[in-house]
Image (cartoon, rainbow, N blue to C red):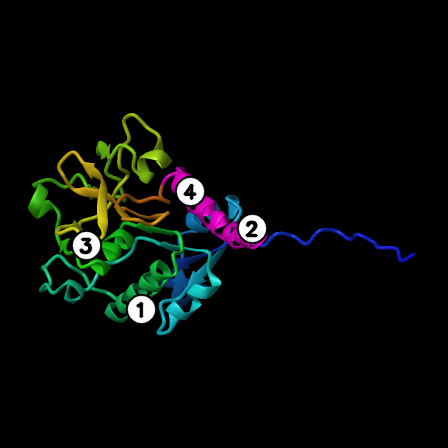
Amino acid sequence: MNSVTNGPAPARRRPVIGICARTAPVTLQGGDLVVSLALQSHVAFLSEAGCAPLLLPLLPGAEELVGRLDGLLVPGGPDLDPALYGAPAHPATQVVTPDADRVELALLRAALDADLPVLAICRGMQLLNVLHGGTLHQHLSDVTGHDGHRPRTASFTLGRLPLKLLPGSRIAAVLEEDEPETACHHHQAVDRVGSGLTVTGRAGDGTVEAVEVTGRPFAIGVQWESGYTADKRLHQALAHAAGRLMKEPSAAMAIH
């Protein structure tokens, strides 16, 4: 009789979530450097939720990595190049990396084409809107008449504004609050909403604060600074969506 030894079951692979990198100058050990980086809270929140965060520098061909991802997080960052949506630059618009803008646009398009779960934050939501043919208000206070979305203070301060969510939307299910509010710091916002997007959240002044890609299981954009507070719910929701995506092929094989 042949004996069979049952070894330990192989560890389940953690969902891999790509995080679009940002570049910034830093001083390290007396030297001036430019580094690719991600907000540590994005890394920590996704890791705590059972994912493996992967930093994605915005270099040509970055979209080719989508096949190795189970989800994508597009974080906040500098202003988008207005040429992406056919507009001249406002005096207050500061375009930092137009080449990286186009790489990130291709990466986001590839992720959506692959039906990956996507969480787009602040600039990320603006990129999501531009990808779908939408436009941006380049200096929001010109439209709203106030600086509540980016308070003018000596130190970095988040704006706190009441948030109205669309009942039954995915973002409403994630937050589950009777009186949610934004934690924002932005001077640009969605103007014309892109085709295929549904507005699921607005500030009291009408500013678009959340959008979802129509017909997608999980493709959410939020204008507020998720990651700058202790609120982990959106990161946990992205992790859950990525985990479900990983299970679906196995479930399909079991049926057949």
- Residue at the top extreme of this rendering: 178
Disc 1 + disc 2, Cβ < 8 Å: no
What secondary structure is marked by label 2?
helix
Q: What's the residue at 19%, 37% (across, down)? A: 203
Q: Nearer the viewer, residue 197 or 89?
A: 197
Disc 1 + disc 3, Cβ < 8 Å: no
For the N terminus, give its image quadrant: bottom right
Mark 2 crowd level (few <14, some 14–19, many ≥20, 10 Å Cα): few
Q: What's the residue at 48%, 64% (across, down)? A: 68
Please give left or right for residue 208 compared with residue 141 in the image.
right
What secondary structure is marked by label 4?
helix
Q: Name the residue under label 4.
A: 237
Q: Name the residue under label 3.
A: 195
Q: What's the residue at 29%, 37% (across, down)? A: 169
Amino acid under label 3?
Ser
Residue 33 seen from this side: no
Q: Nearer the viewer, residue 220 or 186?
A: 220
Amino acid under label 2?
Ile
Query: Tag 3 or tag 1, which sits nearer the N-term?
Result: 1
Distance between mark 1 and mark 3 Cα atoms: 21 Å
Distance between mark 1 and mark 2 Cα atoms: 39 Å
Mark 1 crowd level (few <14, some 14–19, many ≥20, 10 Å Cα): some
Query: Tag 1 or tag 4, which sits nearer the N-term?
Result: 1
Query: Tag 3 or tag 2, which sits nearer the N-term?
Result: 3
Mark 4 crowd level (few <14, some 14–19, many ≥20, 10 Å Cα): many
Disc 4 + disc 3, Cβ < 8 Å: no
Residue 255, numbered circle: 2
- Name the spot of residue 131 as percent of width and height, x first: 23, 60
- Name the spot of residue 219 as percent of width and height, x first: 33, 50
Quarter of image, res 91: bottom left
Image: magenta residue range:
229-256
